[in-house]
Amino acid sequence: MKLADVDPFIGTQPTDLPAPTGIAATWWWPKPQIGNTHPGATFPFGMVSACASSGAYPTGYGEYALATEGVPPRMRERLVASGVTHFQQSGTGAIRKYYNYVRVTPMLGPLDDLGGHWDITEEQASPGSYAFAFANGIRGEVTVGPKSAVHRYTFPEAADARLVVDLSVGGLDIPYGATVPIRAHLESLEPGEAQGEIVVEGTPLAMHMTADAPGWRQLLWYDRRLMPGGRRLDFDAIRPTTMRPFGLMWQGSVAAGATVELRIGFSLRGVEQARRNLAADCPDGTGYEARRAATRASWSQCLAPVSVSGRDDRDARRALGTALYHSLIKPALAPNESPQWPTNGPFAFDICTMWDIYRTQLPLVSLLDPVASTDLANALIEICEEEGNFPIGYRMAKGSDRFSRQASGLAHTLLADLCAADVGGIDWEWALVHMLADLRRAYGEDFLTTGRADPVSHTLDIAFAYWCTARVADRVGDAKAAADCRRLAGRWRNAFDPATGLLRESTFYEGTKHNYSFRLTHDMAGRIALAGGEERFTRLLDRFFGYGADPVVQPGVDPSGDEMEAGYALGRFEGLNNEPDMEAPWAYMYAGRPDRTAEVVHHALHQMFGAGPGGLPGNDDSGGLSSWIVWASLGVFPVAGQDLFLINAPAWPDAAVELPGGAPLRIETVGFRGVGRGTDPQYVLDAVWNGHPLERTWLTGAELRAGGTLRFVLGDTPGSWGTTVRPPSFPSDAAEVTRRL
C-alpha cells in the first residue's frame, strides 16, 4: 500500500455506515460505535505521537465524551483544540487513564487565555504528519520521530505572539480523567534550549527542547504569571488540590507568515537521554521538513509489503491502506527506556491490550516485521522477569495493567508463533521459565487445583497457553515440561457444558458465553465432538451468526440497562464491534463449511467498514480491528499460537505480500467478480498452491513464510472444496483432564 492509500481520519467519528442487510442486519453491537482513532502524527511502533487536543474521550482528540455502550454523546459542539499534546492511544476504549502530556499552544492573546479552546478551521493528516489551522489565523504542523516530536507554527502578523509549553496538563477533560504530575522540574538552559521532567503515574517523562524563535524572549511561567530571569522550576510534591499550571514559553512579535519551530526529544530515563534521543532523531538540528520526510519514508517502507490490484474501488483501497496503517502504530517500542529497572534492552508500552491484539494484530506484525515482534516478545519476557507476570495490558505507568477480567496467558500465543517461525534473538529456555511461572500465578492457581478458572473464559486462555508453552518446551528439549503442559492443555473441556455445546454459565468480559464459545482452540475436533458433532456445531454457529433471524436495532445514545440486557440475551455475533468473537467466522471451516465462512466474512468486510471518518463499527483497539480487515481482505486468517493460516475467498482479484527474507506471497483469483456492499459472496471452488491442487483450507506458517502463489478459483455457488479435509487439531488425552467442578 502507498501513503496516499491512508486516511488517518477513518475511525475518528461515530459509526456512519449504511443500514446493514442480510445476516449482517442481525448482528448486535454492544460497545461504543466509534473507532476512537486520532489523526495525529505517528511513527511505526514509535514512542511518540502528537495531535491537536480538545480533551475529549478517549484519545484527547475530537468532540465526543465517555461512552462504554452505544453511540457516544457529544462533549464538544464542534472541533476545537487547546493546543497539541503528545502520547495518544490508538483506538482504545475503556482504559480511562490517557496521556496527552506536554501541551504546546501557539497563541496571540495573553497567557491568561491558556487552556481555552480555539476552533479548528482546517485539518490535514497523512502517515507521519498532522496539520491544522486555528480560527485566529495560526497554522500548526507536527511530525514525530521514534522518540521525538517536531512542531512548526506559522503566525499572522502580531505584536505579541507566543508559543507556550505546559507541563502540568495530562489526561482528559472527562470526570476523573485528568492526570496530574506528582513531581516536576523545568530548566531554561540558554536561548532556544530547555529541559525538564515530570513524574506521572509513577513514571518519569523527560524532555529536551530546542526552538528556532529568533528574537523572541524565552521565559518560565507559573500560575499563568511570567518569571523574568527565572532559570529553573522545581516541584517536589504536587497535589491535585494545590497544583497550578507551569511551563515555558517563547514570546515576540512576528510578521505575517513567520514560523517558529520547536523540537522535543523524550525519554523515560532522564533529561540527558532525552537530549540524546533528540540528537538521534534530529541530527544537527534537523528541522520539520527533514524529520517529516524521514518519518514518511519509514511509513512507506512499512506499508509497501502489502499490495492489491484488480478493483477500481478507491474507497476500498483507502479502507485497506488505513487498516494496515492503524495495525502498525502500537505497541510503542522503546528500547533502553524502561523507567522501572536500570538495565538496557527491549522495552514496550501501550500494549492495550493483549486481549485486543493477540488474535490478528500480533500475527500480522510477526509476518511483516519479525524484528519488531521479537523486540516485543523480549520486552514481555523482561517485564515478566521484573514484575512477576506477563502483562495483559501495559501502559506508560508504573506497573503493568493486568486487565485481569479480560484474559490470562495471552503472551504465550505470540511466543509460540515466534518459536514455530524459528526467529532468532530470543532465549527460549528463559522464555520457557517465564511462560511456566506466569501460568502458575493469579488465575493459574485455581486452574491447577480445580481444573478450571473463573471467569470460565480464562479456562480456555490458560489451557491454550499451556498448549503454546508445550511447543516452546519441545524446542528446548524439556520433554517432561512438554508432556505436563499438554496434559494441562486438555482441561479446556472443563469450560464447556456438553448439554448445550457452549461454555458454562459465568461472567464474561464484554460479551456472553456465545461470544466466547466459538474460539479457535488447539483441539477443534474435540471441541466439535463435545458439541455433538459437526451438524450440531454448525447449527450453533448458524444461530450465533443470525441465519434466519430478524434484524436487530442497535443501541443509541445512552442506552438503558433493559435495552442492553435484551441485546445480550440474543447471544449474537457482535459484528466486529468488539473483540471476543472476531475469529468465530472461521470456526465453520473445522466443521467442513467454508461456504459459511465466506458468507459471514463477506458481509462483515463489506458492510461493517467504510472509508469515511465513521468507517469503523467499534473501537479499533490498537489495531486489533484494523488488522482483521487486512487479513479478511487478503483471504488469509491466522490461528494465533498455532502457526496456522486458514484461507478463504479474498476481497481483491490480486494481492501480494512481500515477506522478509523470502519469496513474496502472491494471491491470485480466477472468476473474481465485483464485490462490495450489496453484493453476494463468492466461494472458493478450487485452490492451487505453487502449481499444485490444494484440497485443504489452510497453509502452515512455514509454507506461508516461504512465499509462493496461492490461486483461488471462485464461483457464485458453493462447491465441494474444503468439505472433506479439516484443519489440524491437536487433542490432549481426555482421560488426563481433571474435573473438580
Image (cartoon, rainbow, N blue to C red):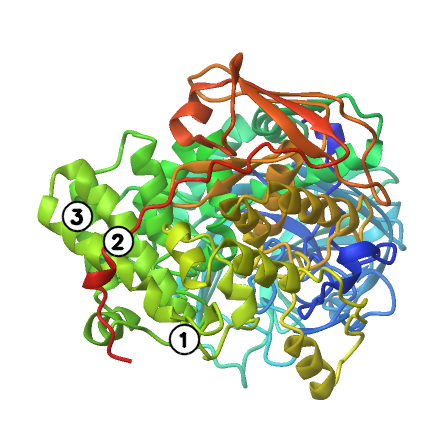
Disc 1 target residue: 455
Which of pointers 2 and 3 lies earlier in the amino acid sequence? Answer: 3
Note whether 227 is above or below 413 in the view shown: below
Q: Distance between the residues labelled 1 and 3?
A: 26 Å
Q: Which amino acid does label 3 sit on?
A: Ala
Q: Nearer the viewer, residue 125 or 274?
A: 125
Horizontal side, residue 583 vs residue 126: left or right: left
Disc 2 target residue: 732
Q: Which amino acid does label 2 sit on?
A: Ser
How would you rate the neighbour count of disc 3 (Cα within 10 Å): few for under 14, some for 14-19, many for 20 or more?
many
Q: What residue type is labelled 1?
A: Pro
Q: How far apart are marks 2 and 3 (CA)?
A: 12 Å
Residue depicted at 70% across the width and 66% down the height: 29
Disc 3 target residue: 482
Q: Distance between the residues labelled 1 and 2?
A: 22 Å
Could you tell me which quadrant the C terminus lies in? bottom left
